[in-house]
Amino acid sequence: MKDLTIDNITDNVHIINSRCPDVRLRFLLERLVVRLHDFTRETRLSIPEWQAALEFIKQVGQVSSDVRHEFILLSDVLGLSLLVDSIDHPKPDGATGGTVLGPFHTHEAENKAAGESISADQDSNRCLWPVDGVKVDVWETDSKGFYDVQYNNRSGPDGRGVLVSDADGCFHFKAIVPVPYPIPDDGPVGKLLCKLNRHPYRPSHMHFRFHKPGFGQLITALYVRGSKYETSDAVFGVRQSLIVDITKVADEEGWADKYGVESSTALLRYDFVLLTEEESNKLREEKARDEAERQGGCELRMGFWSRSRR
Ligand SMILES: [Fe+2]
């Protein structure tokens, strides 16, 4: 097409992109271009605003590294991460809900034996976490609110570990009682929050990621009840079902001896409920079909089937 205008540029981009053989990619790009162009027309976007947006994205890339995931942070503070997880990991009643992965998961956590501590931090309350579940990758900040990867002089992984459940599906480990902390706010995402008059804090929480062949992925976190920012999490990760009470080991008869800790040790326990991979896939496809139905029965155009075959 020639003589492209405000009104016909969108259709032209669709025509050019329509040669893409990947149905799902074609659909994603089509919808992205529609939303992007509509946003631009609706807001009457100016050149300086467009340039500021591109400069912002450039800065997000420049500050990113293997240990600083500013794009995940951006996705988190815009509510996108929670939205994607909710869509891609739908959960029926009774299954543990997911939440944001966040930018601080790493693949370097060491394997821990049952009852071992994941944290070398001596400055905080120790906490015993017996957890009914399967296999878990767990990570948290130190008592000052920093993840290990945020220290330039760190000597290795800390505040994180990988545990394997026992035959009863149980596992436990020692950690520190989580504290609230600000997401890194010295980069472009922090500046954006400041402009939006938003604070950068997350309520006290610990992250969990479950792996087990045959089970759907669960990325979640537990939030300490009553923590500051419980209702204003900067990344929208809190779910009511993931808020937990911290009690004392003394509340459970014989546990101090059983787990080899002082009875005054803080205790957090939680039953995680995983879906099988089959249940998880079935539910995801049901929800996708519902959405396709809502959009007028366009499953094939949306590429759901090519997607599920990947
Ligand atoms: Fe976190």
Image (cartoon, helix red, strand yellow):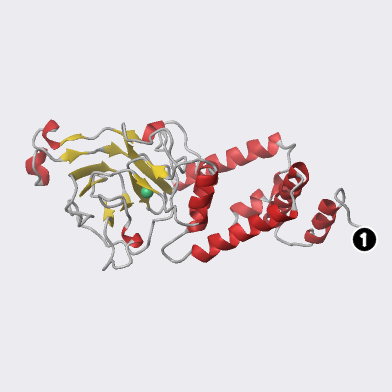
The answer, for residue 81, to whether it is visible in the render is: no
Against 102, residue 108 (above or below) is below
In the rendered view of the protein, which quadrant contains the N terminus?
bottom right
Label total for image: 1
Q: In this image, 278 relative to 241: left or right?
A: right
- The residue positioned 42% from the left and 35% from the top of the image is 239
Q: Horizontally, is 231 left or right of 32 in the view?
A: left
Residue 13 location in percent, x, y?
Answer: 80, 57
Q: 122 or 95: which is nearer to us?
A: 122
Mark 1 vs ligand 1: CB below 8 Å = no
Answer whether residue 248 is visible to the viewer in this image: yes
Q: Mark 1 points at which residue?
A: 2
Label 1 neighbour load within 10 Å: few <14, some 14-19, many 20+: few
- Callout 1: SS: loop
Q: What residue type is labelled 1?
A: Lys
Return the residue found at the far right. 3
Expressed as whole percent of the image width and height from the top left, the position of residue 2 reads 92, 60
Q: In which quarter of the image is residue 157?
A: bottom left
Q: Where is residue 140 in the image (x, y as percent from the top left)?
A: 31, 51
Rendering coords of residue 74 (x, y %): 52, 51
Residue at x 48%, y 45% (from the top left corner): 278
Does 249 sit left or right of 294 as displayed?
A: left
Q: Foreground residue, 214 or 180?
A: 180
Quarter of the rendering occupied by the C terminus: bottom right
